[in-house]
Amino acid sequence: MTSLADLEARVAALEADRADYRAVLAAVGALGQRVDGLNNRVDGMDQRLGDVAVTTNANREAINALGQKVAAHQADTRAEFSALRKDLTDHRHETRANFRAADEQLAEIRDLIVDGFGGRRST
């Protein structure tokens, strides 16, 4: 038979093992809580990243729309400048023609005046 001292030693060993298991379970529980906390943080980060992606897409669409507006404005501006350049060229040619006509008319008037005096000079 087993002595009382042996039984007490075995009970003490079992109680020590049980205390060790409780400590291990407490540590596992604490780690589980930390993991849960980390999971919540990761979920929050995922949500924020999703929000950033949505914002980025919205910004990209706005930038693309702005680029299209700028391109259309550039095309309109180029067309207007081309029209202005053509108008300026037309006006330059018209002005030169008018100056030539005025020069010719002044030459005719000068010839009439010179012929009217008959080559005489007043003294």
Image (cartoon, rainbow, N blue to C red):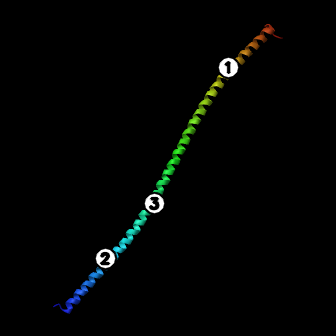
Packing grade of label 1 (10 A; few <14, some 14-19, many >=20) is few
Q: Position of residue 111 (x, y in %)?
A: 75, 11
Q: Residue type at mark 3: give it.
A: Gln
62 versus 76 height, above or below: below
Name the residue at 32% across, 78% down: 23
| Residue at the limit of the structure toward the right, as seen here | 123
Across and down, in percent, residue 109 comes to: 76, 14
Mark with earlier residue (2, 1): 2
Mark 1: which amino acid?
Ala
Compare residues 116 and 120 and report the one nearer the observer. 116
Residue 105 or 81: which is nearer the viewer?
81
In this rendering, position of residue 51 left or right of residue 15:
right
The residue lying furthest to the left in this view is 1
Going from N to C along the chain, the mark reached first, 2 or 3, is 2
Residues at discs 1 and 3 in contact (Cβ within 8 Å): no
Give the mark toward the camera: 1 or 3. 3
Q: Which residue is mark 2?
A: 24
Q: Is residue 120 visible?
A: no
Residue wearing tag 3: 47
Residue identifier under label 1: 97
In this view, 103 is above or below 6: above
- First in sequence: mark 1 vs mark 3: 3
Tell me which residue sits at (46%, 59%) in the image. Answer: 48
Give the number of callouts: 3
State the quadrant of the N terminus. Answer: bottom left
Q: Quadrant of residue 45?
A: bottom left
User: What amino acid is at disc 2?
Assistant: Val
Question: Of the numbered discs in the image, which one, if any, rests on residue 115?
Answer: none
Separation (CA) of disc 2 from disc 1: 106 Å
In percent of the image, x 58 and y 33: which residue is there? 79
